[in-house]
Amino acid sequence: MAQIFETGALDELQIDIDAGNGSVQIRRMHNQKHAAVGTTVVWQDGSASARRILQTFSILFTLAAGAGWFGCGQACAADGAANKPTIFVLGDSTARNSGNGRSGQPIVGWGTPLADYFDSAKISVANVAHAGTSSRTYYNNTNDWPSVLPRIKAGDFMLIVFGINDGGPPRAVRDRGSIPGIGDETVDLKRDDGTVETAHTYGWYMSTMANAARDKGARVYFLTVTARNIWTNPKAKFRDATPIDPLPADYDPRQDKIERGTANGQYTQWTKQLGQKLHLPVLDLTDLCADKYELMGREKVNALYSDHNHTYLPGADIVAASVVSGLKAFKDSPFIPLLSEKGKAVAAADARYVSDNPAP
């Protein structure tokens, strides 16, 4: 509990802020007036004035709403939060991660800095990705898709990207892969308790989650897998992005090429095919990032990664900015009015990276 007291000859202000339950209590004299500028609250009267800088705008808003200055008090704030749409980010460790990388710096998925590109007063970003998951394991894990679906409401958005960990087919329940492709093939996997899991294709899991969210009124966007930090060059061999041997005299860095999608790009193509089949928009994040990385150069890109998959924060922010640029490129993009100043500053991607896939 934090208490702030300001006293003068004819006034007294007490603000009690309880961080535990978010409650705010205010006592003030009738002759006081207030003015709010940015995140600073200035109290003024005839005998004294007091200035107190509050740490967050949310506290300032609660003060105003709780005191009834907006006419409807705290009920307005609660109602606004309930009606505000949410962007759900579904994916693996490329979207959400934790811990430290080989340099000792934290590794971060792009879904974490994505929130900075949107106006939090207009929309929330829920990064519900789970490191190490495939489309199949995310769909089955109790704390993943079964917990996310009930939270989705009409007007929300869902960005869904899997494929890094989907390599299969699975031979046992403990395998995390799905069946390759977008067809209807299945395989029965026996659990230790004797029950059976019927495993499906990558396309089945992606389609099932997308359709369930769309049925609830959410707008679903497929993203193809991010480009991994795996490079080739006709004159050199790399382990991820690090030369295995000294570079030869005729090595040309302009010939460095980055991998464009897992399984030789099959998951990127399958995701695009799913978008066409379901009439859902697709952002080709694979080529968008790969083109950007090849312009940057292998050595600069390598500094953004801890390994071939996982980014440090600067790398995650580049991918997040790429996602935003792609979302802005869709026809009549609903994301543009929801952007923060940082998001507005990002240029829209070239139209070749997006497919709207409208229904006929």
Image: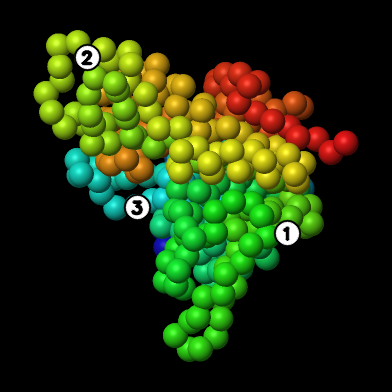
Amino acid carrying label 2: it is Tyr
Q: Is residue 36 left or right of residue 208?
A: left
User: Residue furthest toward the bottom?
Assistant: 193
In the rendered image, which residue does mark 1 sit on? Answer: 212
Q: Nearer the viewer, residue 9 or 267?
A: 267
Quarter of the image for residue 82 reads bottom right
> From this viewpoint, is residue 107 visible?
yes
In the rendered image, which residue does mark 2 sit on? Answer: 251
Check disc 1: other Cα within 10 Å, few if <14, some if 14-19, many if 20+. some
Q: Nearer the viewer, residue 107 or 295?
A: 295
Does label 1 or label 2 sit earlier along the sequence?
1
Q: Is residue 203 left or right of residue 277?
A: left
- Residue 24, given in percent of the width and then of the height, sits at 55, 58
> From this viewpoint, is residue 57 visible?
no
Find the distance from the CA under tag 3 to the CA under tag 2. Answer: 36 Å
Q: Secondary structure at mark 3?
A: loop
Q: Who's the residue at 50% across and 48% down the image?
A: 163
Q: Secondary structure at mark 2?
A: loop
- Residue 7, given in percent of the width and then of the height, sits at 46, 47
Q: Who's the residue at 41% across and 50% down the image?
A: 93
Amino acid carrying label 1: it is Ala
In the rendered image, which residue does mark 3 sit on? Answer: 98
> Quadrant location of the N terminus?
bottom left
- Residue 145, given in percent of the width and then of the height, sits at 59, 63
Q: Who's the residue at 29% across and 45% down the image?
A: 106
Find the distance from the CA under tag 1 to the CA under tag 2. Answer: 51 Å
In front: label 1 or label 3: 1
Q: Nearer the viewer, residue 11 or 360?
A: 360
Does label 1 or label 3 sit earlier along the sequence?
3
Amino acid carrying label 3: it is Ser
Check disc 3: other Cα within 10 Å, few if <14, some if 14-19, many if 20+. few
